[in-house]
Image (tube, rainbow, N blue to C red):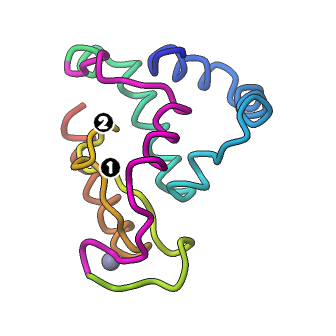
């Protein structure tokens, strides 16, 4: 397994080819499918920022990083696919309306770092998260 830093660099150097390769190599769900398009986009954006900036490189503990594929598998294996939003307690009709959200922004292999949020709560979370990222960088 390639580490996340390498994966991220590769994805950003050739996004289309990487995407194609990934879908061929692994019959797994994409980040978009698991987290929702907006969140997956944000995750990729944040990772690219972390790779590009020295601040990110210093603050980030690369030992905790795992590859995209491994993280997918791990999330699916260990976290219950509930339909209840952990913020507003609403129960959504299907998994389409609820996303996995990473609380720390570090995508840790830690159950406490992941929550289920309804689409509307996720949007609010994303907005706050991006503000925090901008301040950090
Ligand atoms: Zn909610």
Ligand 1 falls in quadrant: bottom left
Foreground of the two, 137 or 9: 9
Q: Quadrant of the N terminus?
A: top right
Q: Which residue is mark 1?
A: 102
Q: Quadrant of the C terminus?
A: top left
Q: Earlier in the sequence, mark 1 or mark 2?
A: 1
Splitting the image into 4 quarters, where does residue 43 fall?
Answer: top left
CA gap, disc 1 to disc 2? 8 Å
Question: Residue 8 location, x and y as percent?
Answer: 52, 23
Q: Is mark 1 within 8 Å of ligand 1?
A: no
> Horizontally, is 41 left or right of 55 in the view?
right
Q: Would you say the residues marked 1 and 2 are in contact, meaning their CB atoms lie under 8 Å apart? A: yes
Question: Residue 117 location, x and y as percent?
Answer: 35, 68
Label 1 crowd (10 A; few <14 / some 14-19 / many >=20): many
Q: Is mark 2 within 8 Å of ligand 1?
A: no
Label 2 crowd (10 A; few <14 / some 14-19 / many >=20): some
Q: Which residue is mark 2?
A: 108
């Amino acid at each position: 397994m390639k580490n996340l830093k390498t994966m991220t660099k590769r994805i950003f150097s050739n996004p289309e080819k990487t995407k194609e390769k990934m879908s061929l190599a692994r019959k797994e769900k994409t980040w978009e499918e698991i987290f929702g398009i907006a969140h997956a986009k944000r995750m990729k954006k944040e990772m690219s920022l972390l790779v590009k900036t020295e601040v990110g490189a210093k603050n980030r503990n690369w030992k905790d990083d795992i590859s995209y594929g491994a993280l997918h598998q791990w999330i699916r294996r260990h976290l219950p696919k509930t339909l209840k939003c952990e913020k507003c307690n609403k129960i959504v009709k299907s998994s389409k309306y609820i996303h996995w959200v990473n609380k720390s922004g570090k995508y840790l292999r830690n159950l406490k770092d992941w929550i289920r949020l309804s689409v509307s709560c996720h949007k609010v979370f994303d907005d706050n998260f991006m503000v925090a990222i901008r301040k950090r960088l």
